[in-house]
Amino acid sequence: MTVKEILHVLKADNSEALFAQAREIRNSVFGNEVFQRGVVEFSNRCRKNCHYCGLRCCNGQVERYSLDADSILSAARCAIDAGLGTVVLQSGDDKSLDPGFIGKIVQSIKAYADVSVTLCLGDHDRDTYKYWRDCGADRYLLKMETFNSELHARLRPGQSVSERLARLETLCSLGYEAGSGLITGLPGMTPEILAEDLWRLSLLPLDMIAVGPFIPHPDTPLGRFWAGSLEETLRATSLVRIMNSKVNIPATSALDALVANGREQGLEAGANVVMPSVTPESVRSEYSIYPGKNSSVDSVLKNVVQMQRRLKIAGFHPSSTRGQSPLRTTKDKECTHA
Ligand code: 5AD
Ligand code: SF4
């Protein structure tokens, strides 16, 4: 699709035909299987100051925490025992993070079970990414948020689109299954910018593409802006599916922050992955990227079982596989970007 065609779809009167087309493609590739990733948010420390995010370093309202190895591993084991085929280790962009600490955790998880391990730890140098890959990490998530240089630089001080793209290319060249994504409805983002973002995202050799709505956090500079639109986010999800039939697309938890059945609506619009938090309940609410994130106070197991129940009620099958994108086997995208 061209940027003009994408924009036309984003602005159309009706979404039903779009959602149905995306669903049909999702069903033809994945059936009614939904891949499950358990996310261990092990540290909320961050050196960055992104204007939209509650974990930004200037937010003094957050109680900062870092979990020890035992707590991380027991959360990971709980997710694996509940049938989740991927563990995601996520933190803010924590400058005190010891690469060796992460490396050992990755090795321990891989020794415990035949699962995929995804890292979502922000910006690090090539040697560190390579070391973690050598320790057995399979995937890395690094979201672009927006490709619009001006908006990116304004909302992510000190960071740039070109630098982010170069990191994604590094990750890809190291053999990671790379994931990226966008936030829809960021203050200053127009439908024209979103259309271009969706187009550029689809040119990249990604295994996972996430699209989530902006949720205003009161303790950030963007706290008084409107949230992103559910409708626009779902349309963007469908467009991603139509342009990238085999890619893994999560029904993001930010959708649930907009409406109670947000994730189900994401799956109905073409998504095929859920990423429940398996962060220990003692710190879960402190991973407060936006309000409503991690509002559940249930135990890790209860949280996962609750997600699986939701999937079944909506007619989906919670898959216990690693949930690798079929792109991996067909290799129909080269590892370079425009
Ligand atoms: N609304 C929605 N998503 C957000 N993120 C951070 N802040 C917000 C917000 N206010 C997402 C970004 C980031 C991830 C950690 O959380 O996509 O990559
Ligand atoms: Fe830190 Fe990520 Fe939040 Fe930016 S979006 S402040 S890098 S946790």
Image: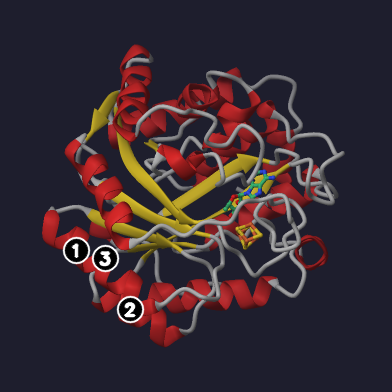
Q: Residue 19's x, y, as percent?
A: 54, 25
> Nearer the N terminus, badge 1 or badge 2?
2
On the image, the x and y values in percent for residue 116 come to: 25, 55
Look at the image and tell me whether residue 247 can be seen: no
Q: Residue at x 77, y 69 (%)?
A: 157
Decide which of tag 3 and tag 2 comes sooner along the chain: 2
Q: What mark, if any, has residue 100 been given in the picture?
A: 2
- In the shown orientation, is residue 247 left or right of residue 91? left
Looking at the rendered structure, the secondary structure element under dot 2 is: helix
Nearer to the camera, 115 or 26: 115
Taking 276 as reference, is 286 above or below it?
Answer: below
Q: Is the C-beta of the residue carrying label 1 under 8 Å from the nearest atom of ligand 1? A: no
Q: CA distance from mark 1 to mark 2?
A: 12 Å
Q: Are marks 1 and 3 in contact (CB under 8 Å)?
A: yes
**Toward the viewer: 117 or 183?**
117
Residue 183 position, x and y percent, is: 66, 47
Question: CA gap, disc 1 to disc 3?
Answer: 6 Å
Q: Locate residue 133, reporting x and y percent.
A: 30, 74
- The type of residue carrying mark 1 is Ser
Mark 3 = which residue?
Answer: 106
The residue depicted at 40 percent of the width and 87 percent of the height is 127
Q: Quadrant of residue 207?
A: bottom left
Instruction: Provide the residue designation for mark 1.
Output: 108
- Report the amino acid beneath label 3: Val
Count the numbered circles shown.
3
